[in-house]
Amino acid sequence: MDNLDILIVEDELFQREMLRDFLRKAGHRATEAESGEKALQLLEKGCFDLMLMDFRMPGMNGLETLLKVKTIDPEIDVVIMTAYGTVETAVSAMKAGAGDYITKPMDLDELAMLIRRIAEHRTLVRENEILRQELKIKGVTSEAIQYKSPKMAELIQLAARIAPSQATVMIQGETGTGKELFARLIHHLSPRAAKPFVAVNCAAIPETLIESEFFGHEKGAFTGAFQRRIGRFEQADSGTLFLDEIGELSPAVQVKLLRFLQEREFQRVGGEKTVTSDVRIITATHQDLEATVKEGTFREDLFYRVHVVALKIPPLKERREDIPVLMTHFIRRFAEANRRKIDGVSREAQDLLVKYDYPGNVRELENIIERAIVITRGSVISTDDLPFQNPVCGNGEAGTSKTPAGNLHQAIAAMERRMIQDAMQQADFNQSKAALLLGLGERMLRYKLKKYGLK
């Protein structure tokens, strides 16, 4: 953990000196200010990582000081100290830019833990900024991985640590969380960065063709094989092969994949020559593969081969801090692509977007923003431009809507049918895209389309 430059803003001398001695003993550098005015003067002259500030002070109070502090240094972390630990105090402080608050009389162990968490987060942010610069130098924009949450910062660091190794990586996460983006990040940070990155969606390839897609085929291997075809394993030689939705592989292909991982060699379909390929495998799945192993649909030995290092991406609803950052990114991108001048999002629309649970995750947010930019009449996206008015929130309720009474199976079937219709419309009636939005395999989607009489 890094030692921090901490500014103590406290009008009571005893409290100020007690905090100063405690922080210096912990290895931090502590500076004192007896008022908000003095704190602003010190900020103008120097640079601090963290400010511990009393909420009620003579002259400028903590809230007034905080608002001015954030205009001088938006990156500084601020913790409010108050003997008036009310919800209103916390809310107003958080809205003004405070990262946290602590009540008086202070528990010094709690304060130490709070400072440790802030120090660790600042270290992550700094390392990730260095990482961004390294990617930029390598010519990799990586701009699609937009985040603010500590969860994503930790994942980025984990990806950076495992990238230089040869370990097989499994990326887990719901559909639309950005699994391929992380696979590309690992590739670009690895010694294989200058070599090919080849991505294969296992769920999108018909079962009869997947072996040929993976390993290639010789001329005449089957009807329509008019010439030799090089498979994805050869195309990715010396580079990285990303196998998305690996849980969709048939048992026969699982055996061949396992053999390759063990021997690093294979044969083309219809061929006798053994081909070798030096390729790093990164896999991804939205399924619980451990459950499929228990069910017997996924080989246990293959699971352990592809599960050497696991990286789990949380759904968007578990990292809502990232939503405003992603919104800004998508607005900029789609406004430029559609030659529209978009100044931002109204407060009401932003509230709806932040509260929505995003069953389709980042991909769904991207789709919502693109649609809003295309249909909005003004330069600011409003609630009228969103496909929902009462978003599904964390408690599972959608605005003031009520769950209909009646037969449970009928209600579930009606909801499923409506979700499939919505996904098909969002995907412009492309079954592969709709299946991804719904988190289903294409075969299962075709079955459900037939079941509900949808075309």
Image (cartoon, grey):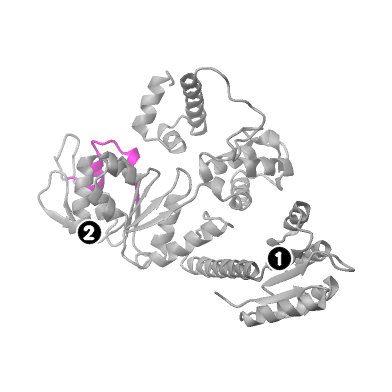
Residue carrying label 1: 79
Q: Which residues are magenta?
A: 199-217
Q: Which mark is residue 403?
A: none
Asked whether residue 297 is in view, the answer is yes
Q: On the image, which quarter does residue 169 sit in? A: bottom left
Q: On the image, which quarter does residue 114 sit in? A: bottom right
Q: Is residue 111 magenta?
A: no
Q: Residue at x 66, y 71 (%)?
A: 108
- The type of residue carrying mark 2 is Ser
Left-right relation of 168 to 215:
right
Asked whether residue 201 is in view, the answer is no
Sequence-earlier tag: 2 or 1: 1
- The type of residue carrying mark 1 is Val
Disc 1 residue crowd, few under 14, some 14–19, many 20+, Cα 10 Å: many
Left-right relation of 230 to 349:
left
Residue nearer the viewer, 322 or 310 = 310
Q: For marks 2 and 1, give the CA distance.
A: 54 Å
Q: Which mark is residue 277?
A: 2
Quarter of the image where the N terminus is located: bottom right
Find the residue positioned furthest to the right: 59
Q: Residue at x 69, y 46 (%)?
A: 341
Disc 2 residue crowd, few under 14, some 14–19, many 20+, Cα 10 Å: some
Q: Is residue 123 above or below residue 100?
A: below
